[in-house]
Amino acid sequence: MHVVVNAAMSADGKLSSRRREQLAISGDEDFARVDRLRAKSDAVVVGVGTVLADDPHLTVKDDALRERRRDDGRPASPARVVVDSIGRTPTDAAVLDDAATTYLCLSEAAPVDRRLALAEHAELLTAGDDRVDLLRAFAALQEQGLERLMVEGGGELIFSLFEAGLVDELRTFVGPTLIGGRDAPTLADGEGFVAAFPALELEAVDRLDDGVLLTWQTDDR
């Protein structure tokens, strides 16, 4: 399995404002790059916080890329995966429509009534007691034939994936925007590391729009 974390952040490292509202950090060039990356992936992964804040669709937008996937014998868009420990995903969320297969990764703490409601819209995978065990969840996704995963946020999920040693590659678009705020989400939220900091190896620097794309490989994968 190959896991690519992709994110857009402001010049000061924020994913959005302290209100957790979606902001346009990227431009057309980066949007097209993200669409190409989605098209190359077997699945696009987000945390439930991203679903609740942005209600993303997580599908391939470009018709030519969708047709190319069909020509290769694949669905027009990759599968969608939501990491959602207690089943907070709304049943009318865009990610649960029929545009692509959706997997919900739950923990044992997810209530039965939420499981029953969500099972009508998605494939349910249970891993972990109080929160999703990412190692087990990703192993289950691999058993479903999902080998190349693209992670689109948010910061809590990204931190947890680095903590679990599951990230192979980090692609970060840094845009020409300053957001600020001690409570604004960053690329890797969560508890934070105090030792054994994940090491990254810079692979490429590319200018896009009025910002820069940084591509990193993890040293320990």
Image (spheres, helix red, strand yellow):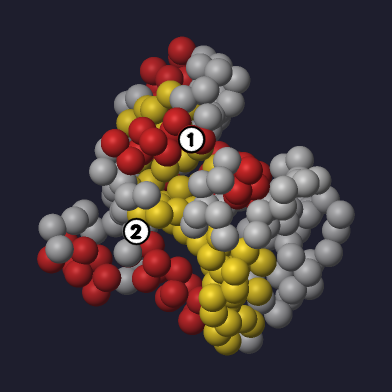
In the rendered view, tell whether residue 1 sits above or below residue 108: below
Q: Is residue 177 left or right of residue 96?
A: right
- Does residue 169 appear in this view? yes
Asked whether 55 or 197 is in front, the reply is 197
| Residue at disc 2, secondary structure | loop
Q: Amino acid at mark 2?
A: Ser
Q: Are marks 1 and 2 in contact (CB under 8 Å)?
A: no
Number of numbered tags placed on the structure image? 2
On the image, numbered disc 1 is attached to which residue?
A: 135
Residue furthest to the right = 182
Crowding near pointer 1: few (<14 within 10 Å), some, many (20+)?
some
Q: Is residue 65 left or right of residue 72?
A: right
- Does residue 16 appear in this view? no
In percent of width and height, residue 73 lies at 13, 58
Crowding near pointer 2: few (<14 within 10 Å), some, many (20+)?
many
Q: Is residue 142 left or right of residue 173?
A: left
Q: Give the residue at x 29% y 56%.
A: 77
On the image, numbered disc 2 is attached to which residue?
A: 41
In the rendered view, tell whether residue 149 sits above or below residue 64: above
Q: Return the mark for residue 217.
A: none
In percent of width and height, residue 89 lies at 51, 34
Asked whether 36 or 159 is in front, the reply is 159
**How far is disc 1 from disc 2 in space, using C-alphas?**
19 Å
Q: Earlier in the sequence, mark 1 or mark 2?
A: 2
Q: Give the residue at x 61% y 81%.
A: 212
Q: Give the residue at x 19% y 68%.
A: 67
Q: Amino acid at mark 1?
A: Leu
Residue furthest to the top = 112
In percent of width and height, residue 3 lies at 45, 54
Q: Give the residue at x 45% y 31%.
A: 136
